[in-house]
Amino acid sequence: MPEISGFAIFVIALLVLAIVLVLMGVKAIPQGMEYTVERFGRYTRTLRPGLHFIVPLMDRIGAKMNMMETVLNVPSQEIITKDNAMVTVDGVVFFQILDAAKSAYQVTNLEHATLNLTMTNIRTVMGSMDLDELLSKRDHINARLLSVVDEATTPWGLKVTRIEIKDISPPRDIVDAMARQMKAERDKRANILDAEGVRQSEILKAEGEKQAAILEAEGRREAAFRDAEARERLAAAEAKATELVSEAISKGNVQAINYFVAQKYIDALGKFADSSNQKVLFLPLEAASVIGSIAGVAEIAREAFGKEPK
């Protein structure tokens, strides 16, 4: 077996070293990540997703930063509100790293710093509000927290996208008092609605009675108008009859007088007979006068139709 010379061994060693150095210098960055590069301990550049080459032995990978949006749970904490009510609050924070170098070198333990900053601002913002505002203005609280925390974390290369308060838990006695208050308020609204319904019913009833009275008065007026018209026509007819009788008398027609007197005489007898207070009537009545009057009426009729009795 031939012996390997020293030069051949040196060449093989150089080749192995070159291969090792190339492998050390080639870096593949996965999607969603960014790596910082340090040369002799100082930051030089940031490697984005893809294949990169660094100088072996001089450069090294510093921090591996996740550039995707991250969710951070805010643990429960007790807060004293403006009106001295003790409540327990928790939430979540959504943030994303925009600058890997700032996030790696401007703050130590980025997530811990963001969490503590969020918790202190939750105490500050919610401690300046009373309990009713905390329970009814969550959107306002979230917006204020987002504005404050996002501005504070900007130097760290972060973008806080959302802060949400998950749960606000008042003490049990306050919850019971709020339930009683809500029940009293609902009972009050129910009583108001009942009273409004009764009022509206009375108004409608009164309006209906008013309309009925108006219609009844209109009916009485119309009836009175009809009665007056009938009396007017009757009076006109009476006047016309009197005029005709007077004209007949002026011409010497005595039968007209007999007709007129007989009509009035018979009408008077009819009124006596229809009286409800008189059931038996005794009058000194001359039958001959009545018969004569009737005969006068018959004579007038014959003259009017121009016929002689058979």
Image (cartoon, rainbow, N blue to C red):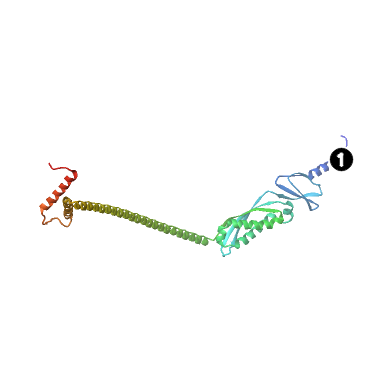
48 over 115 or under it: above or below: above
Of 273 and 3, which appears nearest the observer? 273
Q: What x and y, as percent, mark residue 125?
A: 62, 61
In this rendering, is residue 79 above or below 24?
Answer: below
Horizontal and vertical percent position of residue 291 = 12, 50
**Quadrant of the snapshot with the N terminus:** top right
Left or right? Give the position of 90 relative to 28.
left
Residue under the image location 19 percent in, 45 percent down:
304
User: Can residue 160 be spotted in the picture?
Assistant: yes
Q: Residue furthest top?
A: 1
Q: Amino acid at mark 1?
A: Val
Q: Quadrant of residue 9?
A: top right
Work out whether residue 108 can be spotted: no
Name which quarter of the figure residue 116 lies in: bottom right
Question: Splitting the image into 4 quarters, where does residue 272 fall?
Answer: bottom left
| x and y percentages locating residue 57 in the rendered image | 81, 48
In what quadrant of the picture does the C terminus appear? Answer: top left
Q: Secondary structure at mark 1?
A: helix
Q: Is residue 221 left or right of residue 303?
A: right
Nearer to me, 52 or 211: 211
Residue 7 location in percent, x, y? 89, 40
Q: Residue at x 63, y 57 (%)?
A: 145
Nearest the viewer among 175 and 2 is: 175
Near mark 1 (Cα within 10 A), the count class, few <14, some 14-19 or many ≥20, is few
**Residue beneath disc 1:** 11
Total tally of numbered discs in the picture: 1
The vertical placement of 182 against 11, above or below, is below
Q: Residue at x 45, y 60 (%)?
A: 188
Q: Residue furthest front?
A: 251
